[in-house]
Amino acid sequence: MQKALELAKQGEGHVNPNPMVGAVIVKDGEILSTGYHKQFGKRHAERIAIEDAPTSVEGATLYVTLEPCCHVGKTPACTDIILQSGIKTVVVAMQDPNTLVSGKGNQILREHGVEVIVGVLEHEAKALNEIFCKFITKRNPFVTYKYAMTLDGKIATPNGASQWISSEASRNYVQHLRNKHMAIMVGVNTVLSDNPRLNPRIPNPSTSIKIIVDSLGKTPLDSNIFTSPGEVIIAATYQIEPQTEEALIQHGATVIKTTAVDGQVNLAELLEALHKRQIDSILLEGGKTLAGSMLTLGLIDKIEAFVCPKIIGEGLSPVGGFSLTDIADSISYSIKDVKTIGQDVLLTAYKETLCLQD
């Protein structure tokens, strides 16, 4: 099962909004074949392992990280090919949270005489597919807020200088975070001040969707986001001028409009619209006011905070737009992991553990 999980992770960034799934077939005490879901709309892991096996899999044991699907979508049901193959035992890491499958795939196999064992490395499987679990059960994208700050809690100097607070190793890690998430989101002020490209810079990257939260459509048409790979979504309010909206559309952007909340984009409404577009995950990269709004609305599921061994004194905080007078009113997160990357420490915290519950 550990090997199946390692295989599944190879699909990261390329199968969204599907889950990452790996499969291993064992026969006579040896691994006969393996497979993993490589790309959205393509063959599932179980089908690859069965169809590409060098010899018959009859009587073998299939280890799979997610309950086999039993419905026809872009590909045929995996339960069908498992039953046709003569596989004797199926070992499943976790039950599929999708109501189209949940428990039904395992039941079909059992009803046809296949032994099904569920729960092997279940926690690891749920952690691997935290994005899918949130997206399919809560009907909203999984949102991660990423930032790098100094030991004294600043993300930039008072004039906005931030290159480079984090180490090169941390910046390389961020590229993998970008690849993992289906979309990268920033506020328009980040575009105006930094002119970022917002695309993963790693070999064989996914093509990230770039979301700019820009209530009035101030994003310059010559911004780098328009020349780097990936769809551009401008999240605006209905107050955007028609000619501004049309210019953005003519430049290749998709404009999503929401009602205005204090003149700003209705973020909860925006996430609902993104879910309808099958966008399962968002990496929020700034700025601090947008992050503050997302936090106060409870829309950030996970925080990846790089703490870097520098002190700059007065500077900008990673969160803004609100203030509290009582610590008891603070927004609480639970730290689930601490690790060193280069000279930095990466803190991983969750607002809710979602399907990571033990």
Image (cartoon, rainbow, N blue to C red):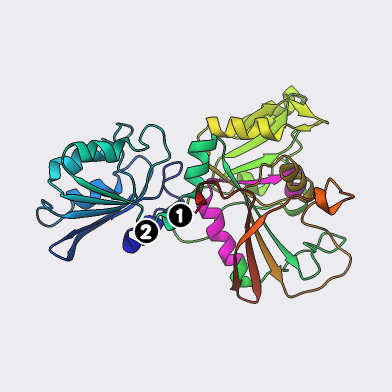
Image spot of residue 263 (x, y percent): 82, 30
149 relative to 104, above or below: below
Image spot of residue 333 (x, y percent): 68, 54
Please give the range of residues in magenta. 171-191
Image spot of residue 3 (x, y percent): 32, 63
Identity of the residue drawn at 65% across and 57% down: 334
Identity of the residue drawn at 45% across and 54% down: 128
Q: Which residue is mark 1?
A: 128
Q: Which residue is mark 2?
A: 5
Residue situated in front as seen by the camera: 20 or 159: 20
Residue 221 as seen in the image, left or right of residue 337: right
Instruction: Inspect the image, locate mark 1, and give the three-letter code of the amino acid beneath it.
Output: Leu
Instruction: Inspect the image, locate mark 2, and give the three-letter code of the amino acid beneath it.
Output: Leu
99 relative to 113, above or below: above
174 relative to 239, above or below: below
352 relative to 304, above or below: above
Residue 92 as seen in the image, left or right of residue 334: left
Secondary structure at numbered mark 2: helix
Secondary structure at numbered mark 1: helix
CB atoms of marks 2 and 1 within 8 Å:
yes
Predominant SS of the magenta segment: helix
Residue 317, image quadrant: bottom right
